[in-house]
Image (tube, grey):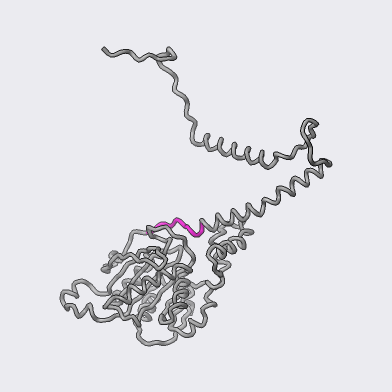
Amino acid sequence: MQRPILDPMFLDDAPRPSVPSRWKVGFLLVARSARLCGRLLLRQYRLRRRESILRVEDGTLVGRLIRAILYRALFVPMLLVGLALLQVYIGMHPRLSVGTLDPSSRDVYFEPVRLTSDDGVSSDAWLAPGIEPGRVLADGDNLLKRKRPAVVMVHDLLGSRQQFLPLIRALHDRELVTLTIAPRGVGTSQTAPVTFGWDESRDIRAAVELLRKRVSVDPARITLIGVGTGANACLRFVESDKSMTSLVLIDTWDNSDERLAAHFVPRRWMSPLQPICKWAFELWYGVTADELNVAHYQPLLTAGRVLQLKDSNDWLHDPREIDRIARFCEDRAIRQVSVNAQD
């Protein structure tokens, strides 16, 4: 026989405790935090004198008020630096949406590969061999052993690999090997801060080394294509590897101060934090932001084979611009080319 459960309150239907809403809980937390901060800031300052409390500091009401304000104003620079560091951290760890399209949407055969840079950071890439699998069956292994030019493509921080899909199709029609990488911190599974091309140059080094080891790639005919921060990464890599002389640079940085300010401080009311954010970024990585300007690499631009496009949007939708870039990558001649997209 089952025994009845006795209610210690001697009530048949005990009332359930009410659960506060999420908004109420949030409001209470904010109110308590504000009250705590106010008590900490105003703990040692009282407008009214109390004889029962020991007063270490004497003076008039106005004098004590001015001293209290000046004392607490010392915390303002610390708060500004803390806010700037938070903005820099958020700016270097963006949350970007990545598309699902890949070269197969353009009827291009590709292989997904994983690159690992010399500092242990992994990045994803699309490797398109430039030939169709059916041709390998028809022509044999000699088709795979024939060396072809190759192209490494790096997109901008706010871009994606999908923007290169029309160009991948055009290069594939010319039987060029393409390797389209997603630099660190952008569209990859491993979390890593973005550095506007500074450390992303290591990802390009891993991509170039992968292509140089392939039998079907001519290591002397590898072209780098970079957009925005990807162009910065290409220039950084070429500065350390003088054998890379073929570049396509799109939307290079002419003024790093404006670019960093627009990224770290997107709102106008936060403009006083611009120099602090730049200083924090330089101090964080021990770099100089001016080295991201294209003017810093002018000797490389004059000594190499460069196609420079100033506008970063027209080439995406203009078949003539895509054809010009593809012909430039296919060209074997070593010559200096400097082209402005507005011409």
Picture layout, residue 22 above or below residue 300: above
Please state the horizontal and vertical placement of residue 286, each as a whole percent of the image: 54, 67
**Looking at the image, which residue is at 48% across and 72% down?**
232
In the image, taking residue 62 as reference, residue 340 lies left or right, namely left
Asked which quadrant contains residue 325, the reply is bottom left
Compare residues 89 and 251 and report the one nearer the observer: 89
Picture layout, residue 116 above or below residue 295: above
Please state the horizontal and vertical placement of residue 292, each as a whole percent of the image: 52, 71
Asked which quadrant contains residue 170, the reply is bottom left
**Looking at the image, which residue is at 40% across and 68% down?**
118
Asked which quadrant contains residue 102, the reply is bottom left
The span picked out in magenta is 90-98
Q: Is residue 245 visible?
A: no
Q: Is residue 64 magenta?
A: no
In the image, taking residue 144 as reference, residue 263 lies left or right, namely right
Picture layout, residue 325 above or below residue 191: below
Compare residues 330 and 240 and report the one nearer the observer: 240
Please state the horizontal and vertical placement of residue 37, each as a whole percent of the image: 63, 41
Compare residues 166 and 184 and report the one nearer the observer: 184
Compare residues 114 and 263 and report the one nearer the observer: 114
Picture layout, residue 38 above or below residue 144: above
Q: Is residue 94 magenta?
A: yes
**Looking at the image, which residue is at 70% across and 51% down?**
74
Please state the horizontal and vertical placement of residue 317, each as a whole percent of the image: 40, 70
Q: Is residue 28 visible?
A: yes
